[in-house]
Image: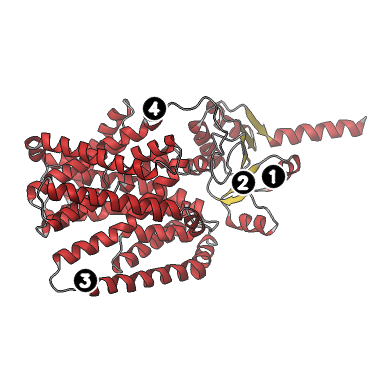
Amino acid sequence: MHHSLLLFVIVLAISIFINIFLKKFKIPTIIGYIITGFIIASFYHFDQESKEFLTKISEFGIVFLMFTIGLEFSFKYLKKTKKEVFVFGFLQVILTGLIFTFICLYLFHISLHGSLTIGFALSLSSTAIVLKILNEKNELHSGYGRIVLGVLIFQDLAVIPIFVMLSIFTSNSKSLDEVLINLLINSIVIIITFLVIGKYMIERYFKLIAATKSEEIFLISVLFLVTLTSFIAEQLGFSYSLGAFLAGMMLAETKYRFRIESDLVPFRDLLLGLFFITVGMQIDWHSAIEYIFEILVITIIIISVKALVIFATLYTFFQKRTVFKTTIALSQVGEFALVIFTLAYSNKLISNIENQILVISVIFSMILSPFMMKNIKNIVDFLMPEPTILRKRAFKEDGFNEHMIICGYGPVGQNVAKSLKELGIKYIILEHDIALVDKAIANGEKNIFFANAAQKSVLEHFNAQGSTGVIISIANEKQKRLICENVVSIDKDVNIVVVVNNEDEEKILEDLEIKHVINDREIISNLLVQKAITCQI
């Protein structure tokens, strides 16, 4: 235990130091985590049991990521994007998989089973990297973001038949008919289970939890739901992440989605960091040095082939800039490929050298991806300059653009909302008390959301940067300060109006240099004096 704790401290220290250094050069934290994993694996030799334990824990980073992504997309939305998922996603996986299979079979003379396994593993992209960066850049709802997500959803679904294919190649006991029948039965079971839970239990479950008004109970309940749905999916032969994604979709149309998302973000980002550390741990520096030329060539071939297939698939259906952005975002290979290669090697479908070269090539493609995605606009501008006349686009499908954000729906917030409605000004309300949200909805208020405005991710989701102003009318002075800090950190030029109760609260906000701080007691006192004087006259 002592040595494990010391190792954990060392890992944290290395990752913090590396990421602080890399941030000076605007290099994504993902790269820092991968380098951390490589460093500790090079100097500290983990036993197989420790590696498996770390890998299992780190998988929950992807689980929480897919759950929060599922919160963004309801079943209704999935119907709207069925073309992106089931047409373009299908074409990308099939075409890329077959081309890589052909290359492995005829150029590198790998066995048919090994070539098929490698080919379809390389067709997958990195859900963890792509969605994390899209979230950070607030581009998940952009034109190319929706296509990317659609393709990634299909890729996640494609993992299932790839694992089935692997089990057929390596199993001597089960026939193909038996495997396919089991898959069909399990698919029906998981769809019925999630539909029943989503329709009849989720809303009641969270209504009961929210009524306790306990942050701790609410968070534990969310963690329970995520792990339960992931466990059910895994037991039925599907991936953890698919179960988490479906659970998120069940909650997407409920009023609890924003609160849940903001509560889970810290856990998701922490576990994703651990996941990328375990990715870095898979780099064998001896193999990297010995086969560096082969690895670089294969990495270039992989990225080039994937890019060409994605570009050719989308070229005739979307704007060229959108196609270029989608191509750049999906051209790397994903984390599931590393799992597939490990299984293929353990079942002797590929050799140790082939496994090491492929694993390091995949990791190199993953390392390149954040740099490409962070500079995606500059790359596309260079390849295809943006037209001088642009159509004005809404920020999101939800229409959160040039709107007023009201934080808190107490008496002041209610009056502000009423006044804005009468003036015809677009607004949204963020309220943390479920009872007030329910009451407002019952009274016909359509623009209220159950969400914690003190969470930066919530303010980013509702586009605080693109708003005409943020009005903060909550009573809690700590929450008030936190909301102001987050808005300023998003964009210091956002027009913030804060209602404070006294001079002490006013002083707490002084260093933030907020232009509009309204002391309600001072205003009431002045009004009382004016009225008294008027009566006296």
Asked which secondary structure carries label 1, the reply is helix
Task: Determine whether, in the image, residue 460 is placed left or right of residue 118.
Answer: right
Placement of 355 over or under 246, stated as above or below: above
Mark 1 — residue? Answer: 417
The residue pinned by badge 4 equals 378
Circle nearer the N terminus (3, 4): 3
Residue that numbered label 3 is attached to: 176
Query: What is the spatial separation of the Cα atoms under label 1 and label 2, in whole angstroms?
Result: 8 Å
Q: Is residue 359 left or right of residue 259?
A: left
What is the x, y in percent for residue 5?
20, 47
Ranked by sequence position, the earlier of labels 1 and 4 is: 4
Going 49% across and 65% down the picture, which residue do you hit? Answer: 202
Q: Residue at x 70, y 42 (%)?
A: 416
- Dot 4: element: helix
**Is residue 400 shown to the viewer in this render?**
yes
- In the displayed orientation, state which residue is furthest to the right: 537
Task: Indicate which disc, 3 or 1, sits on the residue closer to the N terminus.
Answer: 3
N-terminal label among 2 and 4: 4
Q: Residue at x 42, y 42 (%)?
A: 316
